[in-house]
Image: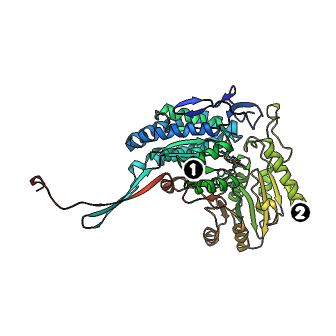
Amino acid sequence: MSFVRLPESPIACRNLVGGEWVLPRDVQRLEVRSPYTGEVIGHVPMTSEAGVAQAVEAARAASVGWRAMPLRERTTLMARFRALLESHLERLSHLAASEAGKTVAEARAGLLKGLEVCDFALSLQNLDTGGALEVSRGVSCEFRREPLGVVAGITPFNFPAMVPLWMIPTALTVGNAFILKPSEKVPLTACALGELLVEAGLPPGVFSVVHGGREAVEALVAHPEVRAVGFVGSSAVARRVYAEGSARGKRVLALGGAKNHLIVVPDADVGLTTQAVVDSFTGCAGQRCMAASVMLAVGDVQHIVDQVLERASRLECGAGMGALIDQASRTRLEAAIDAAQKAGARVALDGRGKKPAGERWANGHWLGPTVLDGVRPDMEAAQRELFGPVLSIVRVPTLSAALEVENASPYGNAASIFTTNGAVAQAVVEGARVGMVGVNVGVPVPREPFSFGGTGESKFGHGDITGVASLGFWTDLKKVTRKWSSRTDGSWMS
Ligand code: NAD
């Protein structure tokens, strides 16, 4: 069985600065290993502050001409990029899957979401993005949306294509120069996106890639020329990036981690609920910010729990789930399962030690679907983001008790209710303190142009990273008030 096509030989990633692929000098280079096999599939340079400064300077210089280019022309170039993305969809899906450990289907879905964001950005020229109003005789007010200049996107390992594509199309189309700092664990897809943007004909420096980790992030966040930072990653880093960027007067939107709850009540449709719960906690091996990690079982829903266990136990590691990103992640998850057991939870389904058949996958990082039952709301397994295929079942007597547990979580990314009763669904839609709510949907990701984003510790900053709300993030809204004198100087006026 083959889950994914790995690159034929290791790819040496370079930074994209001023339209050239350059290798920063005197910096550490890390190996990039495929989570599927442990093989080295690339190398990534850990850019220093000086390397970041070069990229920002090239982006600043390019932003002047890019901003001056008519929107129509920028849109045409971005339409070329969209066409290239589509024609390279399969190659990019395998590349993203091979470095992030996700399934090819999941990687493809991420790219399709990226195409959706491109469609939104390409429609901007036809949208009324401002407005004008005569406020009194001879005086008018209007909005002008203006690009910010140089902006940056810092992205996590789990969506090598989709998360960068949440930001790139809109930020570029409105006229900014964009610097991408991808996760050092998945730099290959970022390079491929850069190649396609160059091939689309973007002027040099309008799109840059700087690889690296903490030092590169801190340099971007500190650089005075970087006006806005879009960040997606864990809450601890999101909080810090938000605090440091905001303290320097930058616009920062920092999306963090999550602990998403699926509330299941006795009248829920058994088949639909079972499939949604299992797909949600095992998809991408649970390494999604939208993964269900807690099932709030309201009243007697044992018949659904039984079905969830039965369906999850039939899943094979690898085929439908993908691999964990690295060995550290597997060790952390196994320790969390042990700790839950010690704290009194029952391991109803144990994925430890599971791996796909075949020598090829022997050095991959695997954990099969794991279900912890009898988890109490005060346990770590109910509170902390585990980021793996582990479902914690918390039993609660009533819907209001379920909402209480949901709303006590510091995170606020997503929650879903599974019911056949509209009033019950409405109570959760209204009562859950989250940014995204689902009704009978395991992964309630809104389609564009509805924006994506949570609340609480899942999002630091205002606005949203995609959709209409992202326009306000990537642009300045200038307010213009005009008054013209009624004096006429020449006979040609009449
Ligand atoms: P991470 O926080 O470790 O890394 C994210 C980015 O920050 C990477 O580019 C990384 O190089 C950089 N970084 C890491 N440590 C840093 C530090 N100390 N200082 C400065 N920069 C640092 O996250 P990850 O492990 O790559 O991704 C998984 C996390 O991302 C999960 O918590 C997941 O829930 C979250 N996530 C959230 C969303 C969302 O929309 N809310 C989407 C995807 C992933």
- Label 2 crowding class (10 Å Cα cut-off): few <14, some 14-19, many 20+? some
Name the image quarter holding the C terminus: bottom left
Say which amino acid is labelled 1. Answer: Val
Q: Does 402 sit above or below residue 4?
A: below
Name the N-terminal-most of marks 1 and 2: 1
Q: Name the residue under label 1.
A: 229
Where disc 2 sits, the SS reads: loop
Q: Can residue 91 be seen in this view?
A: yes
Residue 312's tag is none
Q: Nearer the viewer, residue 157 or 136?
A: 136
Beta carbon of the mark 1 residue lies under 8 A of ligand 1: no
User: Residue 289: horizontal and vertical position, in percent?
Assistant: 67, 53
Q: In this view, does 127 lie above or below 181?
A: below
In the picture as drawn, the residue positioned furthest to the top comes out as 9
Q: Can residue 349 be spotted in the picture?
A: no
Q: In which quarter of the image is the N terminus?
A: top right
**Residue assigned mark 2:** 344
Relative image position of residue 410 (x, y in whole percent): 70, 64
Q: Is 309 located above or below residue 201 in the figure?
A: below
Frontmost of labels 1 and 2 is 1
Q: Residue at x 72, y 69 (%)?
A: 402
- Amino acid carrying label 2: it is Gly
Find residue 442 and report its image quarter. bottom right
